[in-house]
Amino acid sequence: MKKIKRALISVSDKNNLKFLVNNLNKYKIKFISSGGTFKEIKRLGFHCEEVSKFTNSAEILSGRVKTLHPKIYAGILAKRQSRLHKKDLKRNNYDEIDLVIVNFYPFESVIKKTKNNEKILENIDIGGPTMVRAAAKNYKDVTVITNVSQYESLIKNMNQNKGATSLEFRKQTALEAFEETAFYESLIYNYFSNASPNNFSKKIILGFKRFEKLRYGENPHQKGAIYGKSDNLDLYKLNGKQLSYNNYNDIFAALQISKTFPNNKGTVIVKHGNPCGVSMHENKIESFMLAHKCDPVSAFGGIVSCNFIINKKLALELNKLFFEVIIGNGFDKDALSILKRKKNVRLINSENYKISNRNNFISNTEIALIQNPDIKNFKYSDFKVVSKNKPNKKTFQNLIFAFHVCRFVKSNAIVLTNEKSTIGIGSGQPSRLDSCDVAIKKMNEFHDISNKEILAASDAFFPFVDGIEKLVQSGISGIVQPSGSIRDKEIINFANETGTILLFSNTRHFRH
Amino acid sequence: MKKIKRALISVSDKNNLKFLVNNLNKYKIKFISSGGTFKEIKRLGFHCEEVSKFTNSAEILSGRVKTLHPKIYAGILAKRQSRLHKKDLKRNNYDEIDLVIVNFYPFESVIKKTKNNEKILENIDIGGPTMVRAAAKNYKDVTVITNVSQYESLIKNMNQNKGATSLEFRKQTALEAFEETAFYESLIYNYFSNASPNNFSKKIILGFKRFEKLRYGENPHQKGAIYGKSDNLDLYKLNGKQLSYNNYNDIFAALQISKTFPNNKGTVIVKHGNPCGVSMHENKIESFMLAHKCDPVSAFGGIVSCNFIINKKLALELNKLFFEVIIGNGFDKDALSILKRKKNVRLINSENYKISNRNNFISNTEIALIQNPDIKNFKYSDFKVVSKNKPNKKTFQNLIFAFHVCRFVKSNAIVLTNEKSTIGIGSGQPSRLDSCDVAIKKMNEFHDISNKEILAASDAFFPFVDGIEKLVQSGISGIVQPSGSIRDKEIINFANETGTILLFSNTRHFRH
């Protein structure tokens, strides 16, 4: 361990600079700097040498080239134990640089603030990352600091080591340095590739920032955390306990559905990643009541997402039941104070949240399966009426609603609806027939379907007539499904024999 | 567009260098280079200036500092439209560098070949990425090439533009340059953080390489691809059509189960991400037969994973049925030729595949939910016998088997077993009671359970007695479940009243 003698400081974030140089100065460390940092150190009353003086090479190209000089890099990269390197330094009259404190041009905040490509390009830092990378590479001899939050531990470590730093400390900050450079580089790469966010390039590089460590993952023996690209999720918790891993998972599942609804309309209840009640009824309170009625047993402890502002009347209804999370596009003042009576219930304002059109992927950090999201919006022309019995406009719209919900249910998925509310959802079965059974059972358990038009949607084609048969026998009068079975014709015949309305969709909607 | 006059070439991959310089030479481009690339260009018979001559600055520190010189960076970074920049170049007698052809020290292959930290650190390239980043930043004036595969398109573009390149081309190669630097940096970062792969650091940076573009994603209107960190998946396809997105998803689900079994034992059948049959029967053929018998309807078109070498006898059995994918830890020669009779069936050799202990995550490239994998192995001490009726060793082991399978079934999960084979699996239900119904229905549909010991496992606690009641009424004599309900005591009482064996586990195993 060697005392630090010379420090190169170049920081765009000038917070706590006074604390830093004041403490470094106690060890009589020489400062080299340039531009704004140089001025600030001088202003604070410390001696500091300008980089251009140190290198005897003027800053050129409006600052594009200032530190890119062999004297700087020899000072950082020389192995202190190597005789050869020592000779090289001596021969060239170069000095060792033991401490590099650098943070980068604020590329991240600039791309948020402007669309001006010139300005953005100018904020791709070349010198900064190079100094940091060189220092981190040579961490056995050099200390690298990339963040204001490290100043205190640097000074503490130096105090413990009489003006030197420990190898352990240097290795840790080198790791943090590469964390910064890798993240910085991922931002630039993703800015360049932004024109086509959903392409499948030869390599993909994803940089995420941690929002929050979670109490645990899906289960208490698994650790978990939530990360994102931006600075926040655009979800605001107004009340309740910390959100859990499973809460987040269900919240995203719920919002993915409710945010596809027309403005200011619709309620979704999610349990274990699957919807267990969905309604787009015109009346907001009714939409909640109907979503809940779909499967009130499963809804217990679930997550509600209302695609509208939650008002007092609804808040009173919600308070009668137990939900882990209640999401709204805002809350009336009265509603908020009513719901807050339950201390633990998590209330989430999602008015700014937008569903992403970015690729989604499942991965274990070793392997990643990546795909476009299933965000197609349906038009009438996406469906073909293949039965003799034709739907009227309302029935057609209701069938599209059923099919739309079906895409969000884990496969095999069967969704039964009345008007624009679900009344039976069959999910997660390895056999389509079983999903029919589950959906029908739910429907019969909680609903009186007499004199109602009951419609069904299936996320993939029926391989045999038996599933359709079962549905029709249970009172379903209209079905929408993708085509593709070699028995499609049999299925159409069966629909015609029973007067059932049958629509074939263009697209399949597996969700595993 | 300006003709390219000067190129800086420094490549560790020297393939096709002759093609490159030969074509560049036609446009009378001056070459600058160093080290091995310099020698190779000279050897090929072309004129080339050494970097140290160009900069008038010797290569020092055993090559650690050679290109880090203002003359190089001014040449790359100068804006050709800027009078000020032009003046700076002229005043310093610097020359424009219009083309940068660089690839990096082979960090990736070095970390695969050696554990020697010194050697690995030496292969962190500082100069290379800096030149590439500078050139990519200045893509409006400079062309950057980072890969041999780009040589042909470079020459083609220059031929189309009379020795210049198009802006479009330069922008595209700048994007590819940042793809390289970001990926390179992610490798270094992950090498440094490797000691704790499952920590949840402030930032995470993931770099993946594309293995394969897939025909589509989960559905035909979604595009998909598979990526990984290493060069291959350690899965070898020996026969059949291209693997699909859903195939991969199911293959990973199947291997995650079968690879947890004791060596050379056990069969799993997966459909839509859920197991629909699992057996660890000692006899290999029997293990397949029993896994299949669990739910032969759902198994149709599923994925079989045998945790052993598939032999002729099993191949004949497998050929009687329809599976999309058959996975084995290798195939006998005879077995292979029998199975290959079906041209489309995908045969996968998984003998080298290992399940990952890395964090898994779900993400949409904007948000990432990350957690440790659920890889805990069970010991007897992880379970507490809470009923008066105590299990014998065999029953205890069979209960652990049931619970082990249960963790891989999507929640809510109920698994019914006889010996070490499943006979009923209830999955993906928002209510635990429904999962009981589904599992019991499956059991009764395909099995005669008279005189058999039937056991049940639940991935989470039963909130009420009703689920347990249902199971016991259906013939189940032993149950394993996590504890945690306020009604645990009622459940224990019920078990004691009915003589049921009841085990509480330490851990819950949601899988959503």
Image: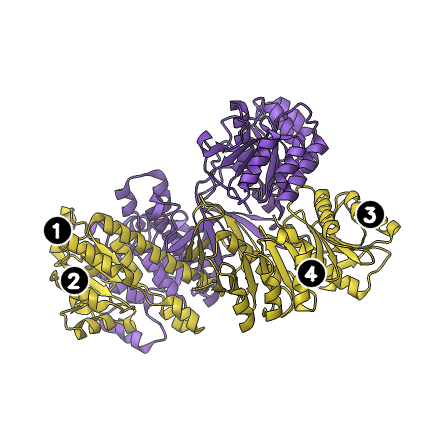
Chain colours: A purple, B yellow
The reply to whether discs 2 and 1 touch (Cβ–Cβ < 8 Å) is: no
User: 10 Å neighbourhood of mark 4: few (<14), some, or many (≥20)?
Assistant: many
Q: Secondary structure at mark 2?
A: helix
- Label whose residue precedes the other's in the sequence (4 or 3): 4
- Give coordinates of residue A264: x percent, y percent: 52, 26
Q: CA distance from mark 1 to mark 3?
A: 92 Å
Q: Are marks 2 and 4 on the same chain?
A: yes
The three-letter code of the residue at mark 3 reads Gln
- The tag on residue B295 is none
User: Badge 2, how many Cα within 10 Å: few under 14, some, many 20+?
Assistant: many
How crowded pointer 3 is (Cα within 10 Å; few <14, some 14-19, many 20+) is rated as few
Numbered disc 1: what chain? B
How far is mark 2 from mark 4, CA to CA?
A: 67 Å
Which residue shows up at 58% across the image and 48% down it? Answer: A214
Q: Which mark is residue B87?
A: 1
Identity of the amino acid at label 4? Leu
Label disc, if present, on residue B290 of the rendered structure: 4
Report helix, strand or loop for mark 1. Answer: helix
Q: Please report whichever mark, 1 or 4, sits nearer to the chain's N-terminal start.
A: 1
Tag 3 or tag 2, which sits nearer the N-term?
2
Q: Is B364 left, or right, of B425 in this rendering?
A: left
**Which mark lies nearer to you, 2 or 3?**
3
Q: Mark 2 and mark 1: span between their CA atoms?
A: 28 Å
Could you tell me the amino acid type at mark 2? Leu
